[in-house]
Amino acid sequence: MKHRLALSLRIALPASLAGVLAAASPPSKPLTPSEIVARAPPSAWAAVPDDDLLVIDLDNRQRVAIALAPDFAPVHVANIRRLARAGWFTGITINRVQDNYVTQWGDATEKKPLPADVVAHPPAEYERPLKGLGFRALGYRDAYAAQAGHAGGWPVATDGKLAWLTHCYAMVGVGRNLAPDTGTGAELYAVIGHAPRHLDRNITTVGRVLAGMEALAALPRGTEALGVYKEGVARPAIVSARLAADMPAAGRPRFEIMRSDSIDFANWVSARANRKDDFFIRPAGAVDICNAMPPVRPAAK
């Protein structure tokens, strides 16, 4: 009887008193984006397949790791795998570093023969059907597309029927000549500046730099037009470029990308758009797709 009476008293508290008690309990502080990432469970992360990780070692002893995107550019990615496995990238150079734009590498002579199994004229893989991607809309307006969002851990834009990877910082594209040329994958570039979204759907985008952006972004700028290095100037060279799948297991780099279909990722995007940590005075209430690149972390060994 005493227990029932106590329960009854708790339920029957006056509304005014209940409000006072609630006010006495400070609201929980919103998590920051970094806290959301740190607390995300293993289920919120997806491993980058070893066959989709291109590992480039430069002659300055710095390493660059690039996640490839076969779901968006299957023929170009297959070419890049073939080039890596044939050792073709070894010895080629970085030929262009344009400030606030791109770092680009390839065969400066344009005479190095390609492996026989490389597709010389790939299709224009600038976009693909949206259907089947598992697209999650960002929820904020985009200047270059009807909608932007994420799919499979990639930044994506869409017109409702077709989808394409966006040219954000650290994204990797295929150098090409004038159309109808689409490039083979033998010449690549990484975005090192403000997102050149005007390139979307004009150049094949094949991946994203997961580690080593500092090695590409801090290189001396080229002094010729478009940031090309002057003839006769020593150029940074590629010592090796291998797929992680072809490296010894003990020294193989591994990465995980936050799953864009996870609740943790949705919370992270919301926190990025509505910063309420102590530093911020006014939350923006929005976020650009290139400021919502899915978090990356080294995989536990």
Image: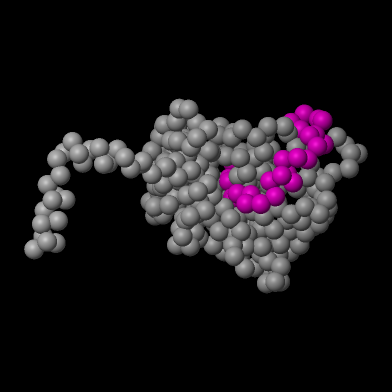
Q: Where residue 198 appears, x then y in whole percent?
A: 56, 32
The reply to whether residue 116 is visible in this rendering is no
Residue 121 appears left or right of 134: right
Residue 9 in magenta stretch: no
Residue 220 in magenta stretch: yes
Write the start and end of the magenta stretch as one range.
203-229
State the residue in front, 100 or 17: 17
In the rendered image, the vertical position of residue 280 relative to residue 24, given as above or below: above
Residue beneath the point at 57% across and 64% down = 49
Q: What number of labels is visible?
A: 0
Corner quadrant of residue 176: top right
The C terminus, quarter of image: bottom right
Q: Where residue 247 appears, x then y in whole percent?
A: 70, 68
Residue 140 appears left or right of 1: right
Q: Residue furthest front?
A: 2
Residue 222 appears left or right of 121: right
State the residue in front, 239 or 117: 239
